[in-house]
Image (tube, rainbow, N blue to C red):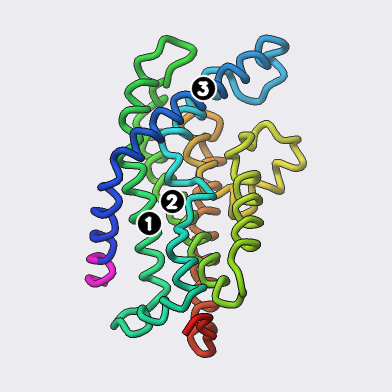
């Protein structure tokens, strides 16, 4: 375990070096968050009682989504990992005294956390200083905030487990582009990144909330905004644990099969 933590620490420090890119991302997310809020405000001005979340809750959802975009964004997969699998450089990892799956898991988690660490504070501070109803509101109580933090960690782990599963499946493809495109498109739509899940029709939402995509950023963002509370929030957290276990087991199984019969495309 110590060697994987060391690998995580190394990748985390490396990720903190890209500060110019982080500031560019902060500026982009400020603008994008403002555009999203303006769009939803236009909708809310028509018939606000028809929406499942209050405008203030939706604003908090959007600002937290932008602040922690790096933790849950489907497209934030490392091209370097895909390239190493495609060109055969992954063979060097087989020579290391460590398992590939936990190494990829630690690397993916470090990349997401380091990028989020550079971007989240400016966005959260800016959003907190905005006047109501356009600013980030405080959590209802400490219990809600604690559950939000817990589900945030679980959501990150589920996201990393899903991404690592994509990496492992890539071992059985000639090119990762098709798999990557389909996976990120499906994940972005069904995890609430495009439209928050409460805005979907009720029957469709009930199905989507059972899928692994809903166990990512959807749960903590809705808990903080007040849309998920009580037994519903605990049930959602339980599903996060379940999907983390399932996705991790699937990733380990696929990687075990890949290690037994691996075709290196380039050497």
Task: Point out which mark residue 59 bears.
Answer: 3
Instruction: Tell me which secondary structure the magenta stretch mostly adopts.
Output: helix
Instruction: Residue at 40% x, 28% y: name it.
Output: 27
Find out whether the residues at labels 2 and 3 contact each other: C-beta distance under 8 Å. no
Report if the CB atoms under discs 3 and 1 are less than 8 Å apart: no
On the picture, is 192 further left or further right than 132? right
Residue in the image at 66% along x and 51% along y? 186
Q: Residue at x 47, y 49 (%)?
A: 155
In magenta segment, residue 76: no
Q: Residues within 10 Å of mark 3 (few under 14, many from 20)?
A: many
First-in-chain label (3 vs 1) = 3
Identify the image quadrant of residue 131.
top left
Q: Position of residue 198 (x, y in %)?
A: 65, 33
Residue 68's mark?
A: none
Say whether residue 155 is left or right of residue 50: left
Category of crowding for the residue at label 2, using alpha-carbon neighbours closer than 10 angstroms: few (below 14), some (14–19), many (at least 20)? many
> Which secondary structure lies at badge 3?
helix
Magenta residues, start to end: 1-6
**Is 220 placed above or below 111 here?**
above
Q: Are marks 1 and 2 in contact (CB under 8 Å)?
A: yes
Mark 1 or mark 2: which is in front?
A: 1
Q: Earlier in the sequence, mark 1 or mark 2?
A: 1
**Is the residue 158 above or below the residue 199 in the image?**
below
SS type, badge 1: helix
Q: Residues within 10 Å of mark 1 (few under 14, many from 20)?
A: many
Q: Which mark is residue 109?
A: 1
Whole-angstrom CA distance, mark 2 to mark 3, is 21 Å
Q: Determine the secondary structure under disc 2.
A: helix
Name the residue beneath numbered marker 2: 156
């Amino acid at each position: 375990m110590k060697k994987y933590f060391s690998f995580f620490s190394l990748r985390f420090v490396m990720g903190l070096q890209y500060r110019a890119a982080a500031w560019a991302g902060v500026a982009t997310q400020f603008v994008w968050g403002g555009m999203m809020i303006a769009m939803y405000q236009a909708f809310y001005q028509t018939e606000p009682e028809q929406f499942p979340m209050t405008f203030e809750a939706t604003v908090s959802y959007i600002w937290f989504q932008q602040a922690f975009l790096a933790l849950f964004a489907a497209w934030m997969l490392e091209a370097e990992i895909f390239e190493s699998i495609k060109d055969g450089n992954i063979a060097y990892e087989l020579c290391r005294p460590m398992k590939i799956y936990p190494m990829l898991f630690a690397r993916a988690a470090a990349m997401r956390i380091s990028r989020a660490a550079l971007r989240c504070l400016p966005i959260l501070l800016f959003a907190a200083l905005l006047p109501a109803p356009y600013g980030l509101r405080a959590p209802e109580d400490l219990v809600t905030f604690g559950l939000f933090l817990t589900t945030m960690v679980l959501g990150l782990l589920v996201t990393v487990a899903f991404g690592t599963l994509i990496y492992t499946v890539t071992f059985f493809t000639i090119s990762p582009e098709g798999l990557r495109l389909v996976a990120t498109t499906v994940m972005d739509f069904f995890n609430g990144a495009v439209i928050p899940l409460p805005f979907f029709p009720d029957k469709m939402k009930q199905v989507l909330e059972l899928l692994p995509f809903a166990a990512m950023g959807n749960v903590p963002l809705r808990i903080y905004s007040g849309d998920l509370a009580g037994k519903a929030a605990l049930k959602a957290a339980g599903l996060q644990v379940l999907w983390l276990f399932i996705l991790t087991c699937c990733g380990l199984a696929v990687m075990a099969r890949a290690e037994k019969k691996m075709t290196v495309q380039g050497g």
